């Protein structure tokens, strides 16, 4: 919690220094990339998942709250939830450097990591997030997304996320160097400007290596395919 | 805070008080700044107007008179009024933070200045995004002497790009996603149709080339989804101007848009351009012309037939158009033709024109302080590697074959051509009818690189945003030559307050005198200014969301006649 | 008495011959070009002189009234800062003349405030026509004065105008009213 206050303090200092009679406008907004129900053949495994950012700041420094999670609809149990408090600062034309904190809530137990990463737009329009989570259960995460415009309103967004644990984390059911992969393809339609865009798609999860072995030992599935329906929001 | 609707014309606060004191006449005007309802026929929203309406009333001044304008702020936020194109003492110029502190809610500010010019001008708020929200109006100044052209009647034709979203919401959306309003992006369907036209490898090469730079050839209008209006009326509301066949009609075109350039034509009538930015030009007859944001053009047309003529303003990016009618009788509606094909930017507009690399000379980029300009890393400007330019097939650069206009990059995709054939006005055609200044050598040159980061929606000059930059300091009495180098792929209408901008278009002593000059992507343009107005002045790109994100400077004029001083006075 | 008869006879002869000269019905009889716009006039037949001042971009007077068949001398002075034309013709002829003037501008013959005689020679050589020296018009540099002597016809809709590109459209044109 102390780290939160530290970041908020830094932020207000940064914002305070930019305010003047001719200050540029404050940038703020909420972008929810995923707010969806994931369905499999088996209702037990259906989840509601979300992934979104709330941001505030200026061109020089932005404070972002990123929240993602999965909620088991049947058993009404929170499967995973992550909250990141990030400070983003531009370091090149298309990329921001990121530093922050991440709080996990698996099974009701808090887990705190430091975050160091990159966020930006790679050539050929690939949106990239690369983060290193620093703690006693460290991991590295790499996400790439691409928006393919079928028309100016109908957009197909394939995405891939790779989460590589750097040390065993048995509570999270992962073993070092046994990555988790999520692949998705979501077809959305911009219904109201870019504020509300409903979508449908597919979501496939899979674990590899020692993590896969661990899951199989515990009698769980190593992979899962979901049909998804949800909303993209931006305001 | 009172809320007045468009129909509430009873609150016209325009009172004319003529006092004669020998040869000096004086006139007094009142303007209230109000929240008003805007109804374009496509959408309704709340906006800002003057004397209960938007556009505000047409202010009619006389050259040589002293005007007093009382402005009452009925909003719950600060406001201001800037008199665009008028030469006046800097404290009357209406820019908060430069001329004065603005006009507080409930306050009445009295402007007072002499009118030293004639022609067509306009006025607008210089606070926040009030101007895009409707705070604009026209100024018509009657000349002392006879004008070098005759007409039987006149109309103000004031254009804007009204948008359903409020100005500050638009700015916020653009910051979150620069392509928020761009619905002309290249799609999969476009890909297939390009493959059909150009072949697979040429199309892939083309997409890769633009993708490498993370830029779009369709990125001509940042803001789309607007409803263009003529004098506050959309096509369905049909602004109408009546004429008697055979009359010469003067049309005073004013582009009061936030972001949109318009191409103007009146099918069936040629237009003779007689004034640009309020200054008489040697008359030139054209079929169509482009009016940049904040510019004005006065033209004479002579409709001879007893019918309706369409006055068409089509946006430069071809996303929207508006039609007004010049009619010989009430109740006529002229035809509204369909929008023309979208233009596309070419590599030439990126400054990749091999013949015109002026804007890309890296050896001349000293002092690029990266700490001040987030993400503007020029050393890594992608696409500058000529070995990596596949698909630079000049035979396919259709833009180059069409028209050449010295004020667009050679091979630019933005060069306009007249819809029904004929002549399209170019800056090169503008020649002053009567030069205001003696033609002399400039005393020094100042380079202003127009820069920006489209993805982050940051716009700047010389890589620095307004709040990070030092003011431009000029000496009273010098003649400054401005060199604008446009390193972005957008056209920027640059406006210097308080002093005339003489556009160097190769016409020597006949160089036209303007207040707003449009710099096309990938080009370098020169202007000169006789520094004869003491005080401090704003100098900025007149695209509202560019000015607000940093493409702005304060100009300080040091020295001047003894009576003037750099004191900031509030009130008048 | 004889003297008076002689005088009357002489007067009659003169009147008859004059009327035969100015009789519109005999107008085609070998007096140079004449038709709907009139004809170049002879200095000796001038009955009136009208002063016309050209400024930027307008004429003073703004319109003219002449008698049908009258021969008028126009003394045209360019008091403006730009080159102007004083040209007597119908509206259609003015419209046809405009592209010619535009050509002269393109070839550098006609500049805003002067006439380039060298360029005119070159244009004459390459195109067969350069400076036009028609009897119904004068093209004058600022400060210069010129003359047009014109005999007006009956029944015509004539205008005097300047066909320098843009000037006609700016209103540098006036009606010539023909009275009986």
Image: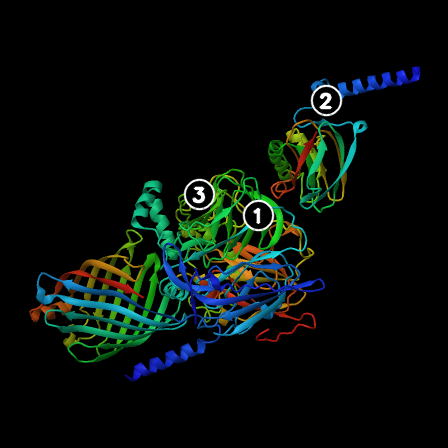
The answer to whether the residues at label 2 and label 3 have Cβ atoms under 8 Å apart is no
Quadrant position of the C terminus of chain C in the picture: top right
Residue B432 in the image, given as x and y percentages of width and height? 63, 51
Same chain under badges 2 and 1? The reply is no
Residue closest to the eye, C79 or B150: B150
Question: Which residue is labeled 2 in the image?
Answer: C32
Residue C53 in the image, given as x and y percentages of width and height? 73, 42
The chain identifier of the residue carrying mark 2 reads C
Quadrant position of the N terminus of chain C in the picture: top right
Residue A9 in the image, given as x and y percentages of width and height? 36, 82
Asked whether, in this view, residue B470 is left or right of residue C59, the answer is left
**Up/down of B458 relative to B154, above or below:** below
Question: Which residue is labeled 1 in the image?
Answer: B153
In terms of image quadrants, where is residue B143? bottom right
Question: Which residue is labeled 3 in the image?
Answer: B334
- Residue B545 got which mark? none
The answer to whether the residues at label 2 and label 1 have Cβ atoms under 8 Å apart is no
Residue closest to the eye, B16 or B433: B16
Same chain under badges 2 and 3? The reply is no
Q: Which of marks 3 and 1 is in front?
A: 1
The chain identifier of the residue carrying mark 3 reads B
Q: Dot 1, crowdedness within 10 Å: few (<14), some or many (≥20)?
A: some
Residue B384 seen anywhere in this rendered image of the structure: yes
Residue closest to the eye, A10 or B283: B283
Q: Which of marks 2 and 1 is in front?
A: 1
Q: How is colour applied across the structure in the image?
A: rainbow
The secondary structure type at the circle numbered 1 is strand
Residue B360 seen anywhere in this rendered image of the structure: no
């Amino acid at each position: 919690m102390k780290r939160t206050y530290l970041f908020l303090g830094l932020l207000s200092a940064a914002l305070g220094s930019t305010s003047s009679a001719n200050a540029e406008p404050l940038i703020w907004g909420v972008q929810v990339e995923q707010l969806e129900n994931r369905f499999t053949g088996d209702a037990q495994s259906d989840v509601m998942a979300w992934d979104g950012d709330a941001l505030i700041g200026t061109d020089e420094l932005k404070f972002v709250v990123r929240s993602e999670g999965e909620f088991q609809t049947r058993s009404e149990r929170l499967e995973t939830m992550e909250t990141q408090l990030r400070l983003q600062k531009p370091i090149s034309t298309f990329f921001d450097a990121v530093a922050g904190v991440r709080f996990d809530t698996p099974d009701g137990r808090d887990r705190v990591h430091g975050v160091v990463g990159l966020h930006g737009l790679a050539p050929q329009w690939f949106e990239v997030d690369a983060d290193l989570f620093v703690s006693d259960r460290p991991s590295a995460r790499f996400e790439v997304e691409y928006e393919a415009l079928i028309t100016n309103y109908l957009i197909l967004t394939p995405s891939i996320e790779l989460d590589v644990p750097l040390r065993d984390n048995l509570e999270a059911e992962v073993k070092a160097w046994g990555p988790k992969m999520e692949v998705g393809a979501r077809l959305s339609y911009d219904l109201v400007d870019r504020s509300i865009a409903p979508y449908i798609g597919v979501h496939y999860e899979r674990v590899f290596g020692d993590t896969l072995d661990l899951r199989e030992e515990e009698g769980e599935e190593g992979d899962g395919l979901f049909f998804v329906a949800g909303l993209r929001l931006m305001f | 805070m009172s809320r007045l609707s468009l129909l509430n014309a009873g609150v016209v606060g325009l009172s004319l008080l003529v006092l004669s004191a020998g040869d000096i006449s004086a006139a007094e005007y009142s303007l209230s700044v109000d929240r008003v309802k805007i109804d374009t026929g496509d959408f309704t929203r709340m906006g800002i107007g003057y004397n209960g309406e938007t556009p505000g009333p047409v202010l009619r001044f006389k050259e040589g008179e002293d005007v007093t304008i009382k402005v009452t702020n009925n909003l719950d936020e600060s406001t201001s009024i800037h008199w665009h194109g008028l030469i006046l003492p800097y404290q009357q110029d209406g820019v908060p933070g430069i001329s004065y502190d603005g006009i507080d809610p409930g306050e009445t500010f009295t402007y007072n200045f002499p009118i030293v010019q004639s022609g067509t001008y306009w006025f607008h708020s210089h606070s926040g995004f009030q101007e895009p929200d409707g705070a604009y109006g026209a100024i018509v100044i009657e000349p002392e002497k006879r004008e070098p052209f005759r007409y039987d009647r006149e109309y103000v034709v004031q254009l804007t790009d009204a948008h359903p979203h409020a100005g500050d919401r638009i700015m916020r959306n653009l910051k979150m996603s620069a392509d928020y309003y761009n619905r002309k992006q290249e799609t999969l369907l476009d890909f297939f149709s390009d493959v059909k036209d150009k072949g697979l490898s040429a199309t892939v090469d083309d997409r890769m080339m633009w993708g490498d730079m993370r830029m779009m050839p369709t990125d001509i209008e940042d803001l789309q989804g607007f409803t263009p209006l003529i004098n506050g009326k959309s096509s369905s509301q049909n602004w109408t101007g009546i004429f008697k066949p055979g009359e010469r009609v003067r049309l005073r075109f004013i582009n009061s848009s936030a972001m949109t350039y318009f191409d103007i034509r009146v099918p069936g009538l040629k237009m003779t351009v007689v004034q640009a930015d309020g200054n008489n030009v040697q008359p030139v007859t054209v079929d169509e012309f482009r009016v940049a944001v904040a510019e004005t053009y006065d033209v004479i047309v002579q409709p001879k037939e007893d019918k309706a003529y369409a006055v068409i303003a089509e946006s430069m990016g071809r996303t929207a158009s508006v039609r007004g009618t010049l009619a010989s009788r009430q109740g006529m509606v002229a035809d509204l033709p369909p929008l023309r094909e979208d233009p596309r930017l070419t590599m030439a507009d990126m400054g990749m024109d091999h013949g015109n690399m002026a804007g890309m000379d890296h050896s001349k980029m000293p002092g690029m302080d990266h700490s001040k300009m987030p993400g503007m890393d020029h050393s890594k400007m992608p696409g500058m590697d000529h070995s990596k330019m596949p698909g630079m097939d000049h035979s396919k650069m259709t833009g180059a074959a069409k028209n050449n206009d010295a004020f667009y990059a050679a091979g630019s995709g933005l060069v306009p051509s007249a819809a029904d054939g004929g002549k399209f006005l170019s800056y090169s055609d503008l020649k002053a009818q009567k030069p205001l200044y003696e033609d002399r050598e400039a005393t020094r040159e100042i380079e202003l690189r127009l820069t920006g980061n489209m993805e982050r929606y940051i716009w700047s000059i010389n890589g620095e945003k307004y709040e990070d930059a030092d003011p431009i300091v000029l000496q009273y009495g010098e003649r400054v030559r401005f060199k604008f180098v446009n390193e972005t792929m957008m056209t920027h209408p640059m406006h210097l307050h308080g002093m005339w901008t003489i556009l160097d278009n190769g016409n020597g002593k006949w160089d036209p005198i303007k207040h707003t000059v449009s710099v096309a992507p990938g080009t370098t343009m020169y202007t000169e200014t006789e520094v004869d107005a003491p005080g401090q002045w704003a100098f900025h790109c007149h695209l509202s969301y560019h000015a607000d994100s940093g493409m702005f400077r304060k100009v300080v004029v040091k020295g001047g006649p003894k009576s003037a001083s750099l004191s900031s006075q509030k009130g008048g | 008495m004889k003297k008076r008869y002689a005088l009357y006879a002489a007067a009659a002869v003169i009147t008859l011959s004059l009327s035969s000269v100015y009789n519109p019905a005999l107008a085609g009889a070998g007096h140079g070009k004449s038709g709907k716009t009139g004809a170049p006039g002879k200095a000796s037949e001038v009955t009136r002189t009208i002063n016309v001042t050209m400024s930027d971009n307008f004429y003073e007077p703004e319109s003219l009234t002449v008698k049908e068949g009258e021969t008028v001398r126009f003394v045209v002075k360019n008091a403006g800062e730009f080159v102007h034309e004083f040209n007597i013709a119908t509206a259609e002829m003015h419209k046809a003349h405009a592209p010619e003037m535009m050509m002269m501008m393109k070839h550098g013959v006609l500049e805003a405030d002067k006439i380039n005689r060298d360029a005119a020679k070159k244009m004459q050589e390459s195109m067969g026509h350069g400076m036009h020296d028609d009897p119904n018009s004068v093209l004058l540099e600022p400060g210069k004065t010129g003359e047009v002597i014109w005999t007006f016809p009956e029944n015509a809709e004539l205008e005097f105008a300047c066909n320098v590109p843009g000037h006609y459209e700016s209103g540098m044109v006036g009606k010539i009213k023909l009275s009986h």
